[in-house]
Image (cartoon, grey):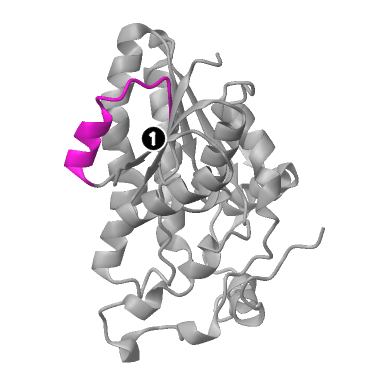
Amino acid sequence: MDTEKILITGAGTGFGRMFALELARMGKDVIATTEVLSQVSSLENEAEEKGLSMRIEKLDVTDPGDREKAWEWDIDVLVNNAAVKEGGSLVDIPEENLHNQFDVNVTGPVLLTQGFAKKMAERKSGRIVFVSSVSGMMTNPFSGPYSASKFATEAVASTLAQELQEFNVEVATINPGPYLTGFNDREMETWKSWQDDPAQRLFDYEKVAFPFEQYDPAEILEPSIKVILGETKAYRTVIPEDMVEQVKQAQQQLWDKKTDEALGQRHQMVQKAYDLKPRTKAEE
């Protein structure tokens, strides 16, 4: 319905910002939310420059007060997009950073969703979209904290789809692959803020980069918008579509993997992290 009110979290940067601007361009009723007030001003300026109308609010999904405030907004579609990405080996990542990864990507969105889901269930309509990742179905070195949070997101979405079915509430996931928004490359620099002893780290993070070639983010818009608007009825939408087989193969490999397989040898994806340059584009 054109009258649907759509709330997008994490609209200050990356995919969330793209979704909000595109939906506003289409004339949709959008509440774009950002983690901090400085992002509100930046998004307001861009929307004004483009002649777009949208409501912009500050919403930190980890802030109980912000969540309470948001529950007062009458929405039809919730897009759980807000996320952070902590890079580094799981044997090196500091406790504080690990907690933050799950607070922002899992706990905060679940708590925010609770208030909206109950309202949707009461009126017997609504749509909840989780912007997950292919990292919620496959892993790669130095993104373990993020992958773990997205595996959790997959579990949350799947569970809610079952629990809210009888209340006529739709649940769907968008699973992007590696896109060149800066998000993945910033992940590989989070070690610079760690409060730890660098001498105790297993890896030298000055020498590693995100181990995937990255796609043009413009191509994610059309299929994602269709999910948000309910025009796509698939529960899971992997973008780009040609990554579907890669994800399935990665999952199958775990069924066949042996615990002593290639012990003593560096994993090929670890080596790729050493070999690849930051912000490497995927071939068209």
| Left or right of 175 in this view: 129 | left
Q: Residue furthest right?
A: 284
Per the rendered image, the range of residues in magenta is: 63-78
Q: Residue at x 38, y 10 (%)?
A: 167
Can the viewer see residue 164 in this picture?
yes
Q: Above or below — where is 16 with respect to 265?
A: above
Q: Above or below — where is 195 with respect to 74?
A: below
Q: Residue at x 23, y 40 (%)?
A: 66
Is 37 a magenta residue?
no
Q: Above or below — where is 237 with respect to 128?
A: below
Compare residues 123 and 56 and report the one nearer the observer: 56
Q: Position of residue 58 (x, y in %)?
A: 31, 44
Can the viewer see residue 36 in this picture?
no
Compare residues 147 and 86 and report the one nearer the observer: 86
Compare residues 223 and 267 and report the one nearer the observer: 223
**Quadrant where the image shows the N terminus:** top right
Q: Which residue is mark 1?
A: 156
